[in-house]
């Protein structure tokens, strides 16, 4: 009976909660943007990852952020007039098309029937439009998106871009160098000889006969006879760097962007190209010019650049550092720091805010040969950063200057924690050739004593001055480990914990109650100081990087899959929609309502309602499969009302991440699994089908 009660607690239906996490860096947001379209010099839109839609009405000075849903991947945007626009992309399982008729205030899904992602959309007239995508998908509407019909392309390659010169004549290019043409409104499509096998990413025509396509390895093809023949024009373009977008403003003037943030310009119809620096190192994936002089390009990390002089120079319309942030810490309610890896040839920077994250400034001063992993402040002025090559750095003036402390090791250091102004601990190990290490100082970092260990250590936390925990992994088998001290770090002992994947973060509410998280969706809890551990189902197989509790019951986890939240001490976890797919690496709360999360590409998010238990909006996670019986003892039947005559992959995983059953099964409404050899307990059952991946909890009694 006890096991059944536990199952009922753990089986509460998951929801996707839309909370109030707001972008603080970069701005206006940091999701990759895939496509941009301006209806005039000042009014424009861009779309991208995590369902992102942004709009400006003042030429990019300010932007409004919309979301079509966190699971959506939006790839292409096109407007037929100032008010009517379309977005193509991919939803949870199908290609989708969104439409607005009020200049982007409201967007509705008008189509979700494509079996593969839609990658490009084009409307040659107000009613007639085409979209192309994966596996040769082409669809068409003749009534402004009210209905769509599927056309036969004759290819199984992914179609990356589509362009029509009139309602009947159009072209599409693929990731294998194919160029397709139709002259009858898509009824039939014929292959054109491109002369290349390089993937083509973008196509653009300036009139009925003259067109360009750009793609991988810096290739640009040109036709002057409506696609009958194509010639390669790449003079001045770095050969080898993929081109993502091509756009022409007249017969001679054109632009192409690449994956390293450069824009190439031609003024002689692609005979030669000149490279123009844009000030960004991230890829620029889409270019759009509303007039001859005014142009915009968007790309990775939410980058937006603009020109008002025909591409001679470009200025950023997005701002903020794009370091790979690893750690965030606030010395008080207003003053916080974020540290991480620099990108490209950029200097090592510490990001600091003095107004609760409204503004973040870059503070230089760390050595160029380091990459910071963790930051901790003991007072408003005194703080420490640890990183690669045994680096420990200290400030006594709120981060404006940093001194290098002697750690006595070259091992990469991953986490720092102080129990008082003088006593602190650092742990580390970042490769397979060096052993792990635990360092301790009793004099505010002036000297450090070391305790070697064979474990790779990722996080350290002390709930009191004597009791501390550090977590990581065993380099031999990759299993998670927990070490504990009760004498202020004089000795450390391994605890018994059945974690089959590395652990990356530890947090204790008091000396007895704590949590560890790690790879493969591991969440484990102890209420007896680590003597025993309870596996908590996360409902995901993502990697978790950081855990933080603001009350006994309320806690947050961040990782590859976003943010999870619990309000009942970890018994159940819900997805706290954060509006990004960027990996999050660290979470910190300054009080019961205000929290920050940081991650890749300079991501800094803030929430101001962390104390509320009301979820603003809910969406049920769709289910395709049912389990019976559950709990079970010798067999489980997987059934589906929608999936039939299809092969599915089934994996049963322990709550600590160990795969105990895996196989392929052909389902005809149902499949029976033999589980008689599995031990009693709670498991995750993962089902992969053509429709996607579904994870369910199951009890073996």
Image (tube, grey):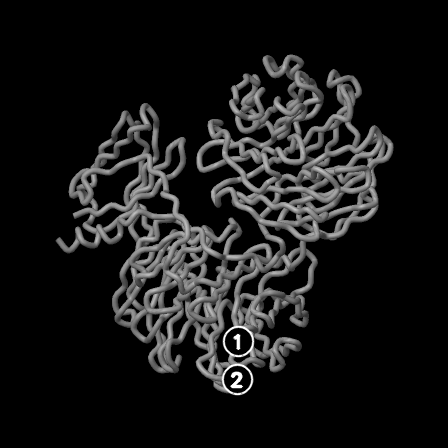
Q: Earlier in the sequence, mark 2 or mark 1?
A: 1
Task: From the viewer's perspective, tell me whether residue 289 is left or right of residue 90.
Answer: right
Where is residue 305 shown, x and y percent of the image? 72, 48
Q: Out of 657 and 15, give the one closest to the viewer.
A: 15
Q: Is residue 124 above or below residue 512?
A: above
Residue 227 in picture, x, y percent from top left: 73, 19
Q: How many marks?
A: 2
- Residue 497: which disc? none
Q: Residue at x 40, y 70 (%)?
A: 470
Q: Is residue 268 left or right of residue 255?
A: right
Q: Position of residue 532 (x, y in %)?
A: 25, 66
SS state under label 2: loop
Residue sitting at x 36%, y 75%: 492
Q: Is residue 435 visible?
A: no
Q: Which disc number belongs to residue 331?
A: 1
The quadrant holding residue 666 is top left
Of 357 and 367, nearer the camera is 357
Q: Which mark's residue is nearer the viewer, 2 or 1?
A: 1
> What is the spatial separation of the Cα atoms under label 2 and label 1, in whole angstroms?
16 Å
Q: Residue furthest right?
A: 268
Bin the neighbour count of mark 1 within 10 Å (Cα to Cα): few under 14, some 14-19, many 20 and up.
some
540 relative position to 382: left or right: left
Secondary structure under the numbered disc 1 in the rendered image: loop
Residue located farthest toward the front when viewing the structure as drawn:
102
Residue at point 80%, 46% (across, down) = 308
From the image, tell me which residue sits under label 2: 444
Assess whether mark 1 and mark 2 are in contact (beta carbons under 8 angstroms).
no
Q: Could you say where residue 189 lies in the image, as x and y percent from the top left? A: 61, 15
Is 551 placed above or below 110 here? below
Point out the residue furthest to the left here: 1
Is residue 16 visible to the viewer in this orientation of the structure?
yes
């Amino acid at each position: 009976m006890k096991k059944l009660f536990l199952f009922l607690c753990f089986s509460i239906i998951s929801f996707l909660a839309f909370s109030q996490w707001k972008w603080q860096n970069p701005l206006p947001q940091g999701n990759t943007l895939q496509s941009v379209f301006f209806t005039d010099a000042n009014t424009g839109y861009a779309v991208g990852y995590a369902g992102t839609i942004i709009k400006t009405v003042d030429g990019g000075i300010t932007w409004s952020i919309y979301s079509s849903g966190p699971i959506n991947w939006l790839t292409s945007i096109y407007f037929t007039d100032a008010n009517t626009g379309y977005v193509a992309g991919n939803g949870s399982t199908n290609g989708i098309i969104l439409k607005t008729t009020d200049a982007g205030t409201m967007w509705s899904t008008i189509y979700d029937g494509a079996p593969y992602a839609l990658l490009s959309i084009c409307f040659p007239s107000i009613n007639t439009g085409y979209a192309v995508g994966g596996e040769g998908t082409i669809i068409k509407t003749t009534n402004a998106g009210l209905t769509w019909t599927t056309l036969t392309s004759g290819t199984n390659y992914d179609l990356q871009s589509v362009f029509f010169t009139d309602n009947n004549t159009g072209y599409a290019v693929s990731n294998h160098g194919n160029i397709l043409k139709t002259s009858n409104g898509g009824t039939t499509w014929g292959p054109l000889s491109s002369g290349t096998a390089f993937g083509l990413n973008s196509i653009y025509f300036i009139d009925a006969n003259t067109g360009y396509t750009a793609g991988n390895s810096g290739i640009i093809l040109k036709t002057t006879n409506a696609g009958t023949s194509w010639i390669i024009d790449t003079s001045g373009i770095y050969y080898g760097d993929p081109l993502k977008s091509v756009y022409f403003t007249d017969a001679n003037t054109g632009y192409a962007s690449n994956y390293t943030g450069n824009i190439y310009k031609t003024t002689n119809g692609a005979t030669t190209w000149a490279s123009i620096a844009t000030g960004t190192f991230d890829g620029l994936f889409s270019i759009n010019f509303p007039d001859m002089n005014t142009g915009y390009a968007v790309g990775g990390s939410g980058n937006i650049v603009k020109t008002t002089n025909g591409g001679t120079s470009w200025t950023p319309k997005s701002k903020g550092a794009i370091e790979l942030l690893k750690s965030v810490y606030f010395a008080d309610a207003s003053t916080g720091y974020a540290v991480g890896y620099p990108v490209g040839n950029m200097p090592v920077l510490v990001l600091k805010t003095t107004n609760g994250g409204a503004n973040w400034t870059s503070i230089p001063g760390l050595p160029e040969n380091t990459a910071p992993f963790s930051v901790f402040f003991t007072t408003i002025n005194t703080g420490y950063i640890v990183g690669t090559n045994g680096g420990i750095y200290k400030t006594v003036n709120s981060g404006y200057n940093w001194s290098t402390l002697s750690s006595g090791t070259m091992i990469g250091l991953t986490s720092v924690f102080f129990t008082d102004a003088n006593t602190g601990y650092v742990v580390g190990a970042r490769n397979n050739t060096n052993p792990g290490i635990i360092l301790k100082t009793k004099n505010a970092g002036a000297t450090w004593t070391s305790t070697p260990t064979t474990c790779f250590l990722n996080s350290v936390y002390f709930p009191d001055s004597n009791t501390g925990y550090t977590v990581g992994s065993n380099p031999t088998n990759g299993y998670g480990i927990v070490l504990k001290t009760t004498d202020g770090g004089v000795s450390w002992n391994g605890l018994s914990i059945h974690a089959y994947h590395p652990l990356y973060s530890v947090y204790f509410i008091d000396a007895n109650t704590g949590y560890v998280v790690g790879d493969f969706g591991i969440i484990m809890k102890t209420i007896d100081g680590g003597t025993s551990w309870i596996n908590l189902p996360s409902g995901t197989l993502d990697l978790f990087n950081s855990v933080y509790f603001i009350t006994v019951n309320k806690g947050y986890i961040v990782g590859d899959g976003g943010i999870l939240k619990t309000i009942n001490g970890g018994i159940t976890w819900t997805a706290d929609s954060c509006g990004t797919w960027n990996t999050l690496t660290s979470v910190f709360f300054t009080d019961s309502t205000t929290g920050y999360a940081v991650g890749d590409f300079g991501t800094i998010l803030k929430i101001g309602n962390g104390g509320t238990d009301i979820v603003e909006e809910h969406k049920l996670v769709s289910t395709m499969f049912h389990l019976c019986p559950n709990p079970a003892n010798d067999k489980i039947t997987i059934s589906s009302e929608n999936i039939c005559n299809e092969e599915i992959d089934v994996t049963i995983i322990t709550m600590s991440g160990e795969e105990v059953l895996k196989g392929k099964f052909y389902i005809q409404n149902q499949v029976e699994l033999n589980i008689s050899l599995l031990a009693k307990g709670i498991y995750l059952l993962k089902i992969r089908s053509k429709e996607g991946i579904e994870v369910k909890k199951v009890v073996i009694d």
